[in-house]
Amino acid sequence: EDKVVQSPLSLVVHEGDTVTLNCSYEVTNFRSLLWYKQEKKAPTFLFMLTSSGIEKKSGRLSSILDKKELFSILNITATQTGDSAVYLCAVINSGGSNYKLTFGKGTLLTVNP
Amino acid sequence: GAGVSQSPSNKVTEKGKDVELRCDPISGHTALYWYRQSLGQGLEFLIYFQGNSAPDKSGLPSDRFSAERTGGSVSTLTIQRTQQEDSAVYLCASSLLQGAGEQFFGPGTRLTVL
């Protein structure tokens, strides 16, 4: 069974801190790994990672994938209260002509002023 | 609008009743996905549609759940004889291509079964 495990489950930091969120996975036929930010109901897309060792960056957020060790990290530098959200990691696997997205349970990040 | 839309936004029903949840994907997106998120849980895959291919129903939790997609666009998720454990937020997402990665999510339907 495909598995995506995120850690920590929750994290409380102060504004300005740097955080690292972890995602490890066990899937057959790995295709890509995605990070989402979920503040209210609908997750919003952050990054898609397909190749190992190539950092994706968007402002204060960055992410990298290690396909050998089967994990990814999401870094947020100089955190702001607006970064408070659940961060979801998901993996796409492909079997034949089918693709499936398996999500982790998420990391709840709280940034206090 | 340009995004994925879902209706209703909230639905309260009594145990044993049937419910229908609707999803309008982004125009031109060939892949459509249904997920549900129970309180404190991660997103659970339910079903996905790709073009005219047979849908992948492997995530449906029981035969009370079914979904259809008409004309390759609008999708309806039907839950028959609802149970209290069906209470969750049901999210729909679409993507331009199957396996393209970036899925655009709708705002979800919060289903409460009393």
Image: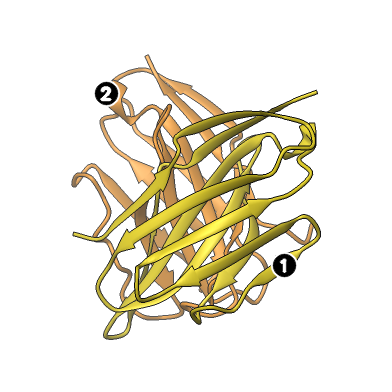
Amino acid carrying label 1: it is Lys
Quadrant location of the C terminus of chain A? top right
- Residue linked to disc 2: B16
Secondary element under disc 2, as helix, strand or loop, is loop
Q: Pick the residue in front: B26 or A61.
A: A61
Chain to which the residue tagged by mark 2 belongs: B
Chain to which the residue tagged by mark 1 belongs: A
The residue carrying pointer 1 sits among few (fewer than 14), some (14 to 19) or many (20 or more) residues within 10 Å by Cα, namely some
Q: Position of residue A56 (x, y in %)?
A: 66, 71
Q: Position of residue B8 (x, y in %)?
A: 59, 36
In this view, B114 is above or below B2: above
Q: Quadrant of residue A75?
A: bottom right
Tags 1 and 2 touching, CB below 8 Å: no
User: At 51% from the left edge and 46% from the top edge, which residue is drawn?
Assistant: B91
Q: Quadrant of residue A60?
A: bottom right
- Residue linked to disc 1: A57
Q: Which chain is yellow?
A: A
Which hue is chain B drawn in? Answer: orange
